[in-house]
Amino acid sequence: ICQPGPGARLHILVRHVTRNTGTHKLGIAGLGLMSALRQWSPIAEFSTGEVRMKWKILVTLFVFFAASYASADSRTLRWSRLAVIAHLDADGRLHVQERHSIVFDGDWNGGERTFRQSLENVLHLDRISRIDASGQVIPLREDKSFTNVDDYAWANSNTLRWRTRLPSDPPFQHREITYLLEYTDANILIPTDDSYLLDHNFGLPDLEWPIDVYSVDLTLDPVWQPLDSIPQHITRSNA
């Protein structure tokens, strides 16, 4: 099932099949009770921390913060493209790549993504990168001081932040910057009587800014057998 909005929430029933023993329900590292729901909102502070925990209620926030709330009316954002690639591996872990091409206008300082708590989910950030105009992938540096552009750090146990612009720099004027977030979600599958449910929102359902083009590509390891046909590629456009 694919729900409307700036993203795609998929409900997929799968069975785990082995070559020798057929369907079974044991030993899957990705079992859990909830998956990511995403929303967006503004914020404006830096600090540091770690992320790897078992959670109670999970909502994933991907937010941008500004140098001054007083100038909020002059700031705008637009996603020229949001492309999500996800793969459910043999152990039930979901490997996600999110490519955000964002057009900035105004005095935005950077970005933030908060992973709020849910039952049993374990999230691991693999890397965060910026992709320059030539296509080169530039890894961001973990540095809680945020002295330089492309510094990132954990603000606390579940909030990731990075710097896009220095406070002394002029405000953005229709500046497009692309970021690649790569992370792994474990304990996300919900066990049922004879199968597992993947209930995951591959998008930003509460995003207040427009997305011109959105796409998600989902693949499953061969050990996961979907009970119904699933959309391997979804794309939406505001054009």
Image (cartoon, helix red, strand yellow):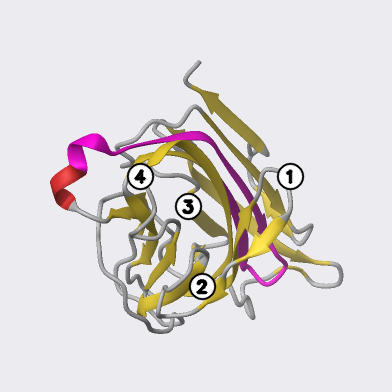
Q: Secondary structure at mark 4?
A: loop
Q: Which residue is mark 3?
A: 200
Q: Secondary structure at mark 2?
A: loop
Residue 187 is labelled as 2
Q: Which residue is mark 1?
A: 134
Q: Report, in whole angstroms, how far the alpha carbon at label 3 lies from the one at label 2.
A: 12 Å
- Looking at the image, tell me whether mark 1 or mark 3 is earlier in sequence order: 1
Q: Nearer the viewer, mark 3 or mark 4?
A: 4
- Please tell me which residue is depicted at 50% across the width and 66% down the height of the picture: 188
Q: Residue furthest right?
A: 20
Amino acid type for the residue under numbered disc 1: Ser
Q: Is residue 174 among the parts visible in the rendering?
A: yes
Q: Report, in whole angstroms, how far the alpha carbon at label 3 lies from the one at label 4.
A: 36 Å
Closer-to-camera residue (204/223): 204
- Relative to residue 142, is residue 101 depicted above or below? above
x, y percent for residue 22: 77, 66
- Relative to residue 209, is residue 164 depicted above or below? below
x, y percent for residue 14: 62, 54
- Looking at the image, tell me whether mark 3 or mark 2 is earlier in sequence order: 2
- Relative to residue 239, is residue 6 depicted above or below? below
Bounds of the magenta segment: 72-101
Amino acid type for the residue under numbered disc 3: His
